[in-house]
Image: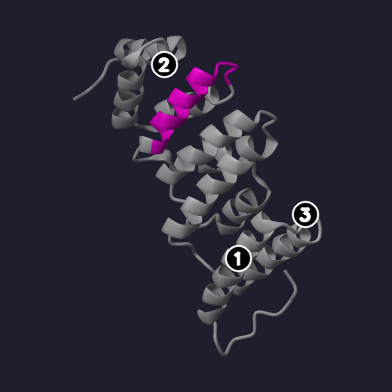
């Protein structure tokens, strides 16, 4: 079914108003329609000062079939965002994206994010199939070393250490017999 520009603009207005259940329906409808123009407009809404608008735009983006156009922008907003709540919303939305080329970025969110960001990133790490290369492993190990030397060594650290060591062991087993040592990047 084709939607007129007027109908699409109306759906965006409902998202920006974000007052009732119709906003969720509008977000889901925009996700269903998809397309580059809608994805770009949704990405722009991620910078809104309204948490409701950010949440609805992130929800729509995570459900868009062609959201790959926005993956880089979402990671940038998470990285450069100041608001922990928004970072949580955006990290949660990443579960609807193809993050297979973003292992290091997701791993950093797991290590350095607040509780929600870290938990959502761990969920992605556990459920996404990533494109792992020796270089990706080296980069992840570098971030782990930074984390390991700059965090309180408590129960949370011990749990992350155990999980991280398991990840590294699993990833390195993919390259048994090959060297993954430091080389020119």
- Residue 32: which disc? none
Contact (Cβ within 8 Å) of mark 2 with mark 1:
no
Label 3: which secondary element: loop
**Residue 135 lies within the magenta run:** no
Label 1: which secondary element: helix
Q: Residue at x 32, y 27 (%)?
A: 28
Contact (Cβ within 8 Å) of mark 2 with mark 3:
no
Crowding at dot 2, Cα within 10 Å, few <14 / some 14-19 / many 20+, comes out as many
Crowding at dot 3, Cα within 10 Å, few <14 / some 14-19 / many 20+, comes out as few
Is residue 7 placed above or below 117 in the rendered structure? above
Place of residue 105 in the rendered image (x, y in percent of width and height, measured from the top left): 61, 52
The residue identified by callout 3 is 152
Could you tell which of marks 2 and 1 lies nearer the N-terminus?
Answer: 2
Q: Residue at x 47, y 51 (%)?
A: 123
Residue stretch in magenta: 48-62
Could you tell which of marks 2 and 3 lies nearer the N-terminus?
Answer: 2
Place of residue 66 in the rendered image (x, y in percent of width and height, measured from the top left): 38, 40
Is residue 159 placed above or below 179 in the rendered structure? above
The residue identified by callout 2 is 15
């Amino acid at each position: 079914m084709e939607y007129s520009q007027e109908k699409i603009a109306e759906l965006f207005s409902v998202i920006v108003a974000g007052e009732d259940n119709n906003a969720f329906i509008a977000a889901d409808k925009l996700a269903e329609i998809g397309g580059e123009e809608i994805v770009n407009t949704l990405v722009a809404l991620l910078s809104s000062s309204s948490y409701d608008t950010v949440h609805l735009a992130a929800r729509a983006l995570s459900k868009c079939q062609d959201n790959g156009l926005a993956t880089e922008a979402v990671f940038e907003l998470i990285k450069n965002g100041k608001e922990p709540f928004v970072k949580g919303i955006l990290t949660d939305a990443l579960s609807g994206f193809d993050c297979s080329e973003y292992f290091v970025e997701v791993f950093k969110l797991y290590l350095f994010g607040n509780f929600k960001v870290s938990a959502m990133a761990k969920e992605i790490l556990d459920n996404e199939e990533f494109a792992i290369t020796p270089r990706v492993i080296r980069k992840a190990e570098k971030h782990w070393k930074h984390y390991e030397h700059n965090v309180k060594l408590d129960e949370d650290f011990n749990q992350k250490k155990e999980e991280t060591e398991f990840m590294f062991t699993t990833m390195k087993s993919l390259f048994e017999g090959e060297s993954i040592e430091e080389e020119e990047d």
